[in-house]
Amino acid sequence: GQQLNQSPQSMFIQEGEDVSMNCTSSSIFNTWLWYKQDPGEGPVLLIALYKAGELTSNGRLTAQFGITRKDSFLNISASIPSDVGIYFCAGHPNSGYALNFGKGTSLLVTP
Amino acid sequence: GAGVSQSPRYKVAKRGQDVALRCDPISGHVSLFWYQQALGQGPEFLTYFQNEAQLDKSGLPSDRFFAERPEGSVSTLKIQRTQQEDSAVYLCASSLAGTPTDTQYFGPGTRLTVL
């Protein structure tokens, strides 16, 4: 599948700080999704974006679908220890049913 | 209600053995996906079923990998003559409808280790 470039690879922050991570692609995507994966579990959907320019919030999480349809970012405000985990961006390309995933951002939050 | 379940959760195989991994999707979900997640990587698509029809198997890495969903519910991913590079977590996901952008719900995965 098409490569999604996700950054940063890892983040180590203090509780209460804001976090930002992003994802880019060389190809256009029809949807952008952000998932969180805890150890030993499957990914859980956090936010789904369906239109270019769309800005969506889910509690302390905010994500945007880039105007070019080739990028997306996820912000987490006022981080808490349970935000620890690996965050993946994913997207649907123009054709097919497969989701393409980034390599993930590992987030560590210290109390 | 119950989510996607997978069994076994852990499987250790000797190189050359055949393995079968099971996925029970959410009841009533039309679509079923298999993904392979190597250590430190994101999931990679393997194959897609809509009911019992396998509509996309473009991600299967070799002809040693075979998936089926004969009655449109439970699915089995079979790997023949396992190799060390097959070691990974195999994730199953299901979605309610047959549209590409429908939300995919993931199971906990089966961790396969090939010695």
Image: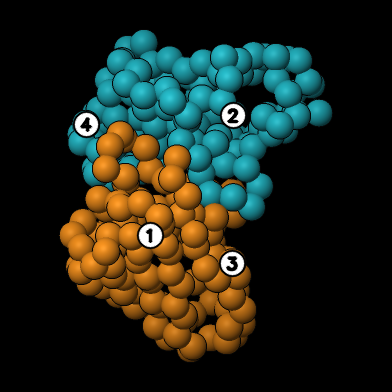
User: Secondary structure beneath disc 2?
Assistant: loop
Q: Gap between marks 3 and 1, in whole Å?
A: 15 Å
Q: Which residue is mark 4?
A: B98
Q: Amino acid at mark 2?
A: Pro
Circle 1: is it few (<14), some (14-19), or many (20+) Cα within 10 Å?
A: many
Residue type (three-letter) at the residue carrying disc 4: Gly
Amino acid carrying mark 3 in the image:
Gln
Label 2 or label 3, whichever lies nearer to me, is 3
**In the image, are marks 4 and 1 on the same chain?**
no
Instruction: Quickly name the residue at label 1.
Output: A34
| Res B36 quadrant in image | top right
Mark 2: few/some/many CA within 10 Å (<14, 14-19, 20+)? some
> Disc 3, disc 4: CB below 8 Å?
no
**Of marks 3 and 1, which one's residue comes earlier in the chain?**
3
Percent x, y of residue B111: 63, 37
Residue at mark 2 to residue at mark 1: CA–CA distance: 27 Å
Quarter of image, res B52: top left
Q: Which residue is mark 2?
A: B8
Say which colour chain A has. orange
Residue B72 placement (x, y as % from top left)? 30, 17
Q: Is residue A3 above or below residue B99?
A: below
Instruction: Check chain identity for marks 3 and 4: say if they share one.
Output: no
Q: Quadrant of the C terminus of chain B?
A: top right
Distance from Cα at disc 2 to Cα at disc 4: 27 Å
Q: Is residue B67 left or right of residue B14?
A: left
